Amino acid sequence: MALFGKDLGVDLGTVNTLISDGGEIVLHEPTVVAIDVEELKIVEVGQAARAMDGRVPETIEVMRPLREGVIADFEVTHRMLGHFIEKISGPARLFKPRIMITVPYGVTSVESRAVHEAALQAGSRDVYLIQEPLAAAIGVGLPVATPSGNMTVVLGGGTSQAAVISTGGIVSAHSVRVGGIRLDEAIISYTRKKYGLIIGSRTAEEAKIRIGAAVPQAEEREMEIQGQDQVTGLPRTIILTTGEVVEALQETLQLQIAAVRNVLESTPPELASDIIDRGMVICGGGSLLRGIDKWLTQETGVAAYLAENPVECIAIGAERGLSILERIRRSLPAV
Ligand SMILES: Nc1ncnc2c1ncn2[C@@H]1O[C@H](COP(=O)(O)OP(=O)(O)OP(=O)(O)O)[C@@H](O)[C@H]1O
Ligand SMILES: [Mg+2]
């Protein structure tokens, strides 16, 4: 392989972008870009751009080029990807890499063509697309090529997806454009309604990660939350508890789980029995929410397990997909 350049797996997400090379994650950065709006130039990408958020003059805009799993700003996305690829392979690339890059299940052909084109323009030789739940299944090491039912659930920042995979392809799948970002928004609206306090999205995400859970926990945590009083506009602090975050998240979790329910309902009976025996594997950043496995098991009646490598398995699976291309090819999105 080395002679002809390398293979890369890219998990292009609404919140994070990961790149796998040789089965290792070589890049894990926020999908964030800082742009000089006067000169229309990229100032920073990834972690460095995110760190600038809220601390820059008006001439610099810190933005996310993807929304709900799909490219919202094409120009910025392909340039960001170019920066990322250059970062891991150096500016003097002799051979362009072959790339397998993720798209959410169920995107339109226009949306997937944009991802294909962005990866090509970012400097790759051949670009293949793969649906996230399939990449996840390969990355987790499920026997995707065999005629048995394997189910994955991917809980991302902008999407939630579920799929049943058998014989190298997706048998049934469903995706909703609701993810972790919407959970943060649910916390924002909860504290506004209950305490009259306006909080920022970073604070809400921190509360979700530090004290949040999908089901009530034996260990109740607390966190001081700073925000702005809705009436006076003055800064104020409240204490938020695990129980309150659990309550705040329920409605949005129900929207996310629609993807899982839909797949379970549309899986052919022969495969459904495999799924009941083996359960479903959950991955993506949203799978790190405490108790989500228990919650999914309770809500669906099918056992849900957290993947061993829940955040990295998607990029790793995308890269590995290139080595079993012939077995999965007919299931990949056409461009
Ligand atoms: N410990 C945690 N508990 C709950 N949520 C978490 C935790 N860690 C990360 N997250 C959430 O995971 C989400 C990001 O997940 P991920 O990186 O898989 O998304 P993405 O791939 O960028 O998005 P998508 O696939 O939907 O386009 C964010 O909303 C983040 O808040
Ligand atoms: Mg993702």
Image: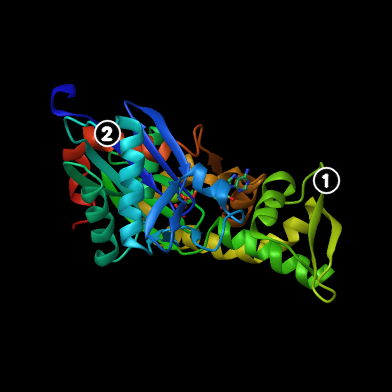
- Camera sees residue 131: no
Q: The residue under label 2 is which amino acid type?
A: Pro
- The residue lying at 38 percent from left, 64 percent from top is 72
**Residue 271 spot, x, y in % from top left:** 36, 49
Mark 1 and mark 2 lie on one chain; the one further toward the N terminus is 2
Quadrant in which the N terminus is drawn: top left
Q: Is residue 197 left or right of residue 91?
A: right
Q: Which image quarter: residue 315?
A: top left
Above or below, comparing residue 289 to residue 248 in the picture: above
**Residue 64 spot, x, y in % from top left:** 46, 57
- Name the residue that disc number 2 marks: 91
Residue farthest toward the bottom in the current orientation of the protein: 231
**Residue 197 spot, x, y in % from top left:** 79, 67
Q: Please state which of residues 162 and 224 is positioned toward the viewer in this rendering.
A: 224
Number of other residues with Cα within 10 Å of mark 2, as a class: few under 14, some 14 to 19, many 20 or more: few
Number of other residues with Cα within 10 Å of mark 1, as a class: few under 14, some 14 to 19, many 20 or more: few
The secondary element bearing badge 2 is classed as loop
Q: Is residue 223 left or right of residue 25?
A: right
- The residue lying at 16 percent from left, 41 percent from top is 125
Quadrant in which the C terminus is drawn: bottom left
Q: Please state which of residues 35 and 75 is positioned toward the viewer in this rendering.
A: 35
Q: Please state which of residues 138 and 24 is positioned toward the viewer in this rendering.
A: 24
Which of label 1 and label 2 is nearer to you?
2
**Residue 209 spot, x, y in % from top left:** 67, 46
Q: Is mark 1 within 8 Å of ligand 1?
A: no
- Name the residue that disc number 1 marks: 220
Q: Is mark 2 within 8 Å of ligand 1?
A: no
- The residue lying at 48 percent from left, 46 percent from top is 276
- The residue lying at 80 percent from left, 73 percent from top is 230
- Camera sees residue 35: yes
Above or below, comparing residue 230 to residue 142 in the picture: below
Q: Is residue 66 left or right of residue 195?
A: left
